[in-house]
Amino acid sequence: MQQSLLEMRHVEISYGGEPVVHDVNLVLKPGEILGVVGESGSGKSTLIKAAMGLLGNQGRITGGDILYKGNSLLHMKPEALRKMRGPEIAMVFQNCASSLCPIRRIGDQLFELMEQHNQRNREKVIDRALDLFEKMNLSDGRNILESYPFELSGGMNQRVGIVMAMMLKPALLFADEPTSALDVIVQAQVVKELMKLRDEFGTAIVIVTHNIGLVSYMADKAAVMYQGRLLEYGATKEIISNPQEAYTQRLIQAVPKIRRG
């Protein structure tokens, strides 16, 4: 039986002592895509921030456990967790431009990232970045490496963020609303490119979104969150075709349907 890549067991998360996520159980296998869907404030982004150790000073995991390849992330020493971020687990944010330094070129920021993981051969770093840019349908990779974030469009910065996350070929990629700040055409391109990375590298993806249509298109499994609780969880096709909860039904009904003629 294939070992789980990521497992959340009865996870409870609190902010300022107030529980905001309650008793969540999830399992992700290698190479799977899990879509976590729900409205703002449902706790979906909080889940992946907890797994990355990014809850901030007020956030605490107050119950349960989060396992990566069978090892508890909650009991891992901070240095070990830091070394795991990048080579094992990476994250793409809603607005990647905001996580980039505005006064440093993209290439320098990429190289600094790789230096932190003892990869100091600049030529190899550049070759790796150019290869990933090409996979993200960005043919002018060398120009991007010489650019500052403010010189790039929102869609290009988002792809740069995905390339940075994939530089160390992580087994698991968290994507927190990675397309919500983009126009519809660029959204579709980024989603297809994420799926291409999964197919090429076997990277498992947890994508957090309010768009159940996106989950339906790309995810193997779906998790529906509402007010910090997991309402439905299972195979995406089953949840979309046979939703058990009224809230899930409303999410599905809210997806725009375009009729011809």
Image (cartoon, helix red, strand yellow):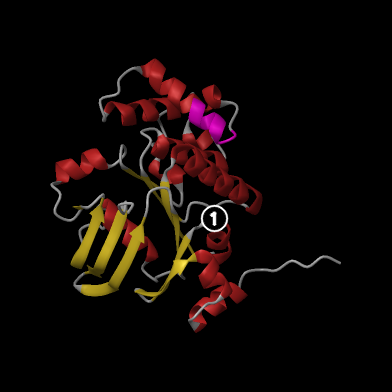
What kind of secondary structure does the magenta stretch mostly adopt? helix
The number of numbered discs placed on residues in the rendered structure image is 1
For image coordinates 52% across by 77% down, the residue present is 243
Q: Is residue 259 left or right of residue 237?
A: right
- Residue 141 % position (x, y): 54, 26
Q: Secondary structure at mark 1?
A: helix
Q: Which residues are magenta?
A: 131-137
Q: Quadrant of residue 57?
A: bottom left
For image coordinates 55% across by 42% down, the residue present is 193
**Relative to 38, residue 102 above or below:** above
- Residue 110 % position (x, y): 39, 29
Which quadrant would the C terminus be assigned to in this image?
bottom right
Q: Is residue 59 visible?
A: no
Residue 165 shown in magenta: no
Which residue occupies the foreground of this view, 257 or 42? Answer: 257
Look at mark 1 in the image and give the residue it sits on: 218
- Residue 187 % position (x, y): 59, 51
Mark 1: amino acid = Met
